């Protein structure tokens, strides 16, 4: 894991970068194409070109061969291994993209050994990658994260990896192209989008905690309740899906009564209130949304067959002796104290695995591998005090 972590009230989430690391690998591998070997005629000039380019072609063929072997790999089955090359960026340096509340290196925490591990799937060759490698492989692509704060963490960690954690003034803010501008009185925009001019890669995030369309029930009332349509995708996706090459979706931790009451959400399906039926249970309601979003995206992929879409499983909760608001804690700082290996063939998040079954939406399974990394929380750490000279 890398240098970001969670704000204290959000202890259930892991440090920034764990899920993003797997996302990067799955996204990169999904973009591998079958090798194309150029055949030259036997003129001296073209034979010279063939000779000069042979080594590069051979290296590309080896990489493509690895990709084909990995095509059916279960990346969620494997183990955490120590790696001195990690982390991929410094949590101290990546201030341009990393929110302060998730920056463990800015906390009083002193032990950062959790940063020096990487995930190694069983029976798969994991290609090495770096910021420049990501930029090259995603040239002329748009990578979009749509979901809750876990998706936002993935987005921020991806920006840190792509820039090597260095200040990058050349990266362009293109949020306006996607309507991601801060509204008057708002704390922040609904998301962010940035373009790397050197490779024309755009990475964006859009906040949608439920992935569902939200409709104000009284447009003239500023504190109105909202209809949360379980069977309709969030409007942002319907408007901009055609712009994406890779899309990573997630939802999960906002499906509780506290969040629903605080957000003034009311459950709707088929254009009507749910009432007190089976879907009034929020777990069933969430599962319907997962099923609906996977089917809707699958139907859209007929028009955009080159697009890669992932539905991410839920991040596990690591609280002991209570929940976040009932005295629970997640203060372990010893890496892999609960084991280092995942051997199961199926996801620990069965609703998400079931939702994508039979569709072209891919499963991004981070639940079991994240469950082993409970030492990556901010826990009781607080921000370091800055002493003025």
Image (spheres, rainbow, N blue to C red):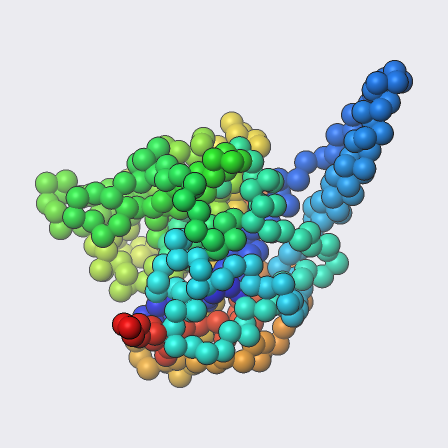
Residue 115: which quarter of the image?
bottom right
Residue that lies at the very extreme toward the front in this rendered image: 389
- 163 or 229, nearer to the observer: 163
- 300 or 55, nearer to the observer: 55
Above or below, 219 against 349 in this view is above
Residue at 49%, 78% (x, y): give it: 111
Residue at 41%, 44% (x, y): give it: 169
Q: Give the image location of residue 179, x and y in percent.
A: 30, 36
Residue at 47%, 35% (x, y): give it: 197
Residue 196 visible in rendering: yes
- 247 or 54, nearer to the observer: 54
Q: Give the image location of residue 41, x and y in percent.
A: 86, 17
- 159 or 318, nearer to the observer: 159
Q: Give the image location of residue 69, x and y in percent.
A: 75, 47
Q: Give the image location of residue 136, x and y in percent.
A: 59, 40
Residue that lies at the very extreme toward the left in this rendered image: 220
Above or below, 348 against 24 in this view is below
Above or below, 160 against 195 in this view is below
Residue at 36%, 59% (x, y): give it: 99
Residue 155 visible in rendering: no
């Amino acid at each position: 894991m890398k240098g970001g972590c969670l704000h204290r009230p959000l202890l259930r989430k892991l440090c920034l970068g764990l899920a993003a690391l797997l996302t990067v690998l799955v996204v990169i591998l999904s973009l591998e194409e079958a090798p194309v070997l150029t055949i030259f005629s036997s003129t001296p000039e073209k034979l010279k070109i063939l000779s000069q380019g042979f080594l590069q072609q051979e290296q590309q063929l080896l990489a493509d061969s690895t990709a084909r072997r990995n095509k059916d790999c279960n990346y969620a089955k494997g183990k955490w291994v120590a790696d001195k090359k990690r982390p991929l960026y410094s949590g101290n340096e990546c201030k341009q993209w990393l929110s302060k509340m998730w920056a463990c290196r800015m906390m009083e925490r002193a032990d950062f050994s959790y940063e020096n591990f990487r995930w190694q799937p069983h029976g798969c060759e994991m290609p090495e990658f770096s910021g420049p490698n990501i930029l090259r492989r995603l040239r002329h692509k748009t990578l979009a994260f749509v979901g809750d704060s876990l998706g936002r963490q993935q987005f921020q960690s991806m920006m840190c990896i792509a820039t090597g954690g260095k200040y990058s003034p050349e990266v362009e803010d293109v949020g306006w192209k996607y309507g991601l501008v801060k509204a008057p009185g708002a704390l922040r925009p609904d998301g962010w989008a940035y373009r790397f001019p050197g490779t024309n890669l755009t990475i964006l995030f859009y906040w949608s905690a439920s992935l569902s369309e939200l409709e104000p029930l009284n447009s003239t009332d500023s504190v109105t309740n909202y209809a949360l349509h379980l069977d309709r995708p969030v409007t942002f996706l319907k408007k901009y899906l055609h712009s994406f090459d890779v899309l990573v979706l997630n939802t999960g931790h906002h499906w509780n009564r506290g969040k629903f009451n605080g957000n003034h959400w009311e459950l709707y399906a088929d254009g009507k209130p749910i009432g007190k039926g089976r879907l009034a249970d929020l777990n069933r309601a969430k599962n319907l949304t997962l099923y609906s979003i996977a089917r809707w995206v699958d139907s859209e992929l007929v028009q955009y067959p080159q697009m890669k879409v992932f539905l991410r499983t839920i991040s596990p909760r690591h609280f002991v002796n209570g929940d976040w608001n009932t005295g629970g804690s997640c203060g372990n700082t010893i890496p892999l104290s609960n084991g280092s290996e995942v051997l199961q063939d199926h996801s620990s998040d069965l609703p998400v695995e079931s939702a994508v079954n039979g569709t072209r939406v891919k499963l991004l399974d981070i639940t079991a591998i994240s469950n082993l990394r409970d030492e990556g929380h901010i826990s009781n750490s607080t921000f370091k005090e800055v002493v003025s000279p």
